[in-house]
Amino acid sequence: MLRPLIIAAATLTALPLAAQDAEDGSAGPKDTRDATYLQSVDDTNVVNANGEKIGEIDEILIDADGNPAAFVIDMGGLLDLGDEDVAVPLEALQWNGKEYVSKMTEEQLQKLQPWDE
């Protein structure tokens, strides 16, 4: 009879210590990333080889393994009226430091099957 009480008392006294570890961030995974390299690509311009804007990044699609697989580009339209979204493979765009440059022409992009969530 005394043994279950001892186990219960030991468990209850250990809980505050575990809670303290979690509160001060000492338990669990640590984020060691330097936030200066992180940036959002949402609404980043996509331009052609001549630097003319042909659309914006709307979102990034991931495959079944959780890896980035394609960009959804929002092309044309005004204020989301009359625009068309197309999914392009990651390799079809190249980052130049401020925007994405499409390796495909605007005509090739327009021929892609529209992306509809």
Image (cartoon, rainbow, N blue to C red):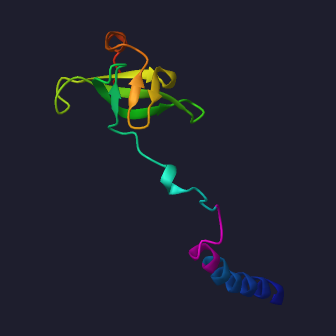
Q: Position of residue 18 (x, y in %)?
A: 66, 77
- Foreground of the two, 61 or 33: 33
Residue at image x 82%, y 90%? 2
Q: Is residue 23 visible?
A: yes
Magenta-colored stretch includes residue 33: no
Q: Is residue 117 visible?
A: no
Q: Position of residue 80 (x, y in %)?
A: 20, 31
Q: Quadrant of the N terminus?
A: bottom right
Give residue 48's quadrant in the image: top left
Give residue 55's quadrant in the image: top left
Q: In this rendering, is residue 53 above or below 107?
A: below
- Foreground of the two, 28 or 3: 28
Q: Which residues are magenta?
A: 20-29
Secondary structure character of the magenta stretch overall: loop
Question: Total marks drawn?
Answer: 0
Give residue 112's quadrant in the image: top left
- Foreground of the two, 105 or 6: 105
Residue at image x 64%, y 61%? 29
- Foreground of the two, 108 or 98: 98
Task: Return the residue found at the far front.
Answer: 50
Residue at image x 33%, y 19%? 50
> In screen coordinates, is 7 left or right of 42?
right
Q: Quadrant of the C terminus?
A: top left
